[in-house]
Image (spheres, rainbow, N blue to C red):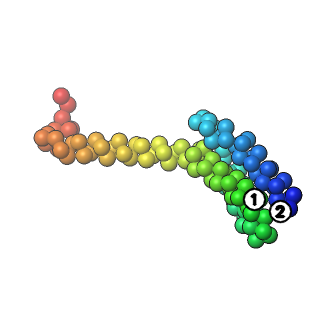
Amino acid sequence: MMWQDLVFMFGSGLSIVFLAPTLRNASANVPLGTSLPSMGIGFVYGVTFFTLGMTLSAAGAIASGTMWSLIALFRSPASQRVRTTTTLFANDLSRWYDRRRSDRVVADQYVLE
């Protein structure tokens, strides 16, 4: 085992420890312009380390890339818009379904009560 393998694995492990609070903080906003390149670099480094026979470094870099992908998925402003849009769509669909099941005539929804 090469000592460099341990150093790179330790560095990736530290980055995961430092990124964990960002993933846990529901109010954190990390732009996709930051998280996507970091995610890509982590995965590319992981594959590169694996081809060099540095399996510990590869595992650490892939874990770091995975952490960045989770941050991109859950902590980017764009993902919050997607979740909000999905929630609104689900609420509208639920209301539409409830109206279809009720005994009210469709025209009655436009009448003031």
Task: Work out whether residue 27 can be spotted.
Answer: yes
Residue farthest right in this picture:
3
Dot 1: element? helix
Which is nearer the eye, 75 or 33? 75
Q: Taking the image as drawn, is residue 41 in sight?
A: no
Q: Which residue is mark 2?
A: 1
**Residue 54: x and y, percent?**
78, 64
Residue 52 drawn above or below residue 5: below
Q: Position of residue 25 (x, y in %)?
A: 62, 36
Identity of the residue drawn at 66% across and 51% down: 68
89 up-or-down from 4: above or below: above
Estimate how packed mark 2 is, as few (under 14), some (14 to 19) or many (20 or more) residues with alpha carbons within 10 Å: few
Identify the image quadrant of residue 65: bottom right
**Which is closer to the viewer, label 1 or label 2?**
2
Q: Which residue is mark 1?
A: 56
As drawn, 80 above or below 55:
above
x 77%, y 59%: residue:
57
Q: Quote the CA–CA distance across marks 1 and 2.
A: 10 Å
Q: Residue at x 74, y 67 (%)?
A: 50
Indicate which disc residue 90 carries.
none
**Residue sitting at x 16%, y 41%:** 102
Disc tally is 2
Secondary structure of the residue carrying numbered label 2: loop
* Dot 2 amino acid type: Met
> Which class describes the residues within 10 Å of circle 1: few (<14), some (14-19), or many (20+)?
many
The residue under label 1 is which amino acid type? Leu
- Of all residues, the one furthest to the top in this rendering is 113
Establish if 19 lies above or below 42.
above
